[in-house]
Each structure stands twice: as C-alpha cells, then as structure tokens.
Amino acid sequence: MTSRPHLTDADYARLLRLRTQLRKFEHWSAQQAAAMDLTASQHQLLLAIRGHGGSKGPTIGEVAADLLVAHNTAVGLVDRTQELGLIDRERDPSDHRVVRLALSAVGREKLNALSAEHVEELARLAAVVDKLVRN
C-alpha cells in the first residue's frame, strides 16, 4: 500500500472549491443547452459526434464510450436527437453493417453557437482552476 500525503484543511477547501466550480460549469452548460432547446445530454451527443477524430463519424458504441453511458442508453439518446432533426444515421460506405452518426445542418448550427460560448466560459474556468491548483 502506498503512502498518501497528509491533506490539510486548506487542501479540502481547495478540493471543495474546485468541485463547486466544475458543478457550476455543468449547470451553466445545461442552461445554455436548454436555451437552444436541447438537453445537456443532447448537447454532449452533438459534441461527441463533432469532436470524434477521423474522417468518418462515430458509431453509437463510440458515442456511448465518450458519454460514459451504456450502449442502449446511447441508442435512445440518438433516436430522440435524430427525431429532432439534429443528427443523421449513415451507413459506412466500406462496411454496410456499421452505422455512423453525423450532424445535420441544424445540429451543426446549434453546436457551433453553444461551442463558441463554451470556449469563452472554459477560458474563465481555466483561470479559476489554475489559481485553485497553485494555492
């Protein structure tokens, strides 16, 4: 068993402030998504699709892994988000058994608007986190 450093009252206070700031960001993010008529999960799904590396869109399994949810949970989220016209399912051209996800034009517009705001907010959060880590 490895020895862990002794944590001070100040360490616990910093951890609390850090977790509070992260929760505030998540709450703020959910509010921004709601203002665009999206749930926080739908926003995360759009981001997972757009942020997926490579030239092909992600599969539902890959999105489930990014969102830390079970495959069947991701399927339901994809179904509901597709019904809103925000994403499309496309057959992989090289393997027709594989279904890939892509943003629709409307989904892309909503994600672009949300992402610009989030980048600005993350810059503010980074400064707060940096200060908490250094003190």
Image (cartoon, grey):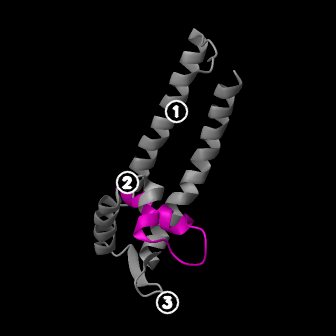
| 103 left or right, relative to 12 | left
User: Quick one: label 1 or label 3, which is nearer the N terminus?
Assistant: 1
Mark toward the viewer: 1 or 3 = 3
Residue 98's place in the image compared with 41, above or below, is below
Q: Is residue 40 magenta?
A: yes
In the image, residue 22 lies at what x, y percent?
Answer: 51, 36
User: Dot 1: few (<14), some (14–19), or many (≥20) neighbours within 10 Å?
Assistant: some
Which of the 4 image quadrants contains residue 44?
A: bottom left
Describe the element under mark 2 as helix, strand or loop. loop
Tell me, yes or no, whether the highlighted magenta stretch contains residue 112: no
**Residue 114 picture location, percent across and down:** 50, 59
Label 3 is placed on what type of residue?
A: Pro
**Label 3 secondary element:** loop
Tell me how far mark 1 sits from mark 2, CA to CA. 24 Å
N-terminal of the two: label 3 or label 2? Answer: 2
- Range of residues picked out in magenta: 39-63
In the picture, which quadrant includes the C terminus? top right
Residue extending furthest toward the front = 1
Question: Residue 21: which numbered mark, if any?
Answer: 1
Give yes or no for contact between labels 1 and 3 (Cβ–Cβ under 8 Å): no
Q: Are marks 1 and 2 in contact (CB under 8 Å)?
A: no
- Which one is in front, 64 or 28? 64
Q: Residue at x 39, y 79 (%)?
A: 89
Query: As drawn, is 79 to the left or to the right of 61?
Result: left
Disc 3 marks which residue?
A: 93
Which of the two discs, 1 and 2, labels the residue nearer the N terminus? 1
Determine which residue is flagged by label 2. Answer: 69
**Residue 112, position in %: x, y?**
53, 66
Task: Give the amino acid at mark 1.
Answer: Gln
Distance in Å between CA atoms under marks 1 and 3: 44 Å
| Coordinates of residue 103 in the picture (x, y in percent) | 46, 74
